Amino acid sequence: MANVQNFGFGYEATDREEYESYASISLSESAIAAAFPPHIDLSWKMTPVKNQGVYGSCVGFAVASMIEIVPVALGVVQDESERFIWYNSKNNDGLGNPNLDRGTFIPVAVGTVQTLGSCWEIRSPYTSPLATPSRVAYSQAQNMKVTNVYRLAGTTLNDYKGMLSIGWPVIVGFDIFGDREYQKEYLFV
């Protein structure tokens, strides 16, 4: 079987201890049950769907989308740089060279946007995903730090639905095994 990192899969499983270091948030069972509308659509709060191409940068895309959701909901389109988040998360995750196409950890990406910040796509475009972002990008990121992050205490489908139904986005990570040919045939990617 092929080495997963050779194919640039974008999500790396997170240590439970690191995950649990975030403040948790949960809804009461009665709030969850009452909160489910027949249809949940947060797309009006988000920028258009983007294509990460062949790179294992899904964590950067997920975290950028989470950051964008509040300003967009307020009518301010703010296109975050997936490349900046992905590159700097890889630089901070302890796995080695950030110039390689490989995945990273969701909590590392979240921590990166809390400590280092993020920048607009125009400052660090995804046209060269493996290149080091510019000084201008790092300068802008200092003024664009995430201040509040929560982990969802529950892990059931109803927990996810509850958060979505009150307008909060959720990042979900899972492992993908095998090589790209297997995925194309069985996972339709």
Image: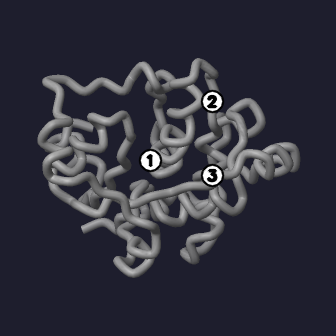
Tag in front: 1 or 3? 3
Residue at 58%, 18% (x, y): give it.
Answer: 75
Q: Which mark is residue 146?
A: 3
Gap between marks 2 and 1, in whole Å? 16 Å
Q: Which mark is residue 58?
A: 1
Residue at 49%, 60% (x, y): give it.
Answer: 102
Q: In this image, 158 relative to 124: left or right? A: left
Gap between marks 1 and 3, in whole Å? 19 Å
At which x and y percent is residue 172? Answer: 32, 52
Residue at 24%, 47% (x, y): give it.
Answer: 160
Q: Report crowding for label 1: few under 14, some 14 to 19, many 20 or more residues within 10 A (C-alpha).
A: many
Q: Earlier in the sequence, mark 1 or mark 3?
A: 1
At which x and y percent is residue 8? Answer: 44, 56
Helix, strand or loop at disc 2? loop
- Amino acid at dot 2: Asp
Q: Earlier in the sequence, mark 2 or mark 1?
A: 1
The answer to whether residue 31 is visible is: yes
Q: Which residue is mark 2?
A: 79
Quadrant for the N terminus in the image: bottom left
Helix, strand or loop at disc 1? helix
Q: In this image, 52 relative to 141: left or right? A: left
Relative depth, front residue between 124 and 43: 43
- Amino acid at dot 1: Cys
Tag in front: 3 or 2? 3
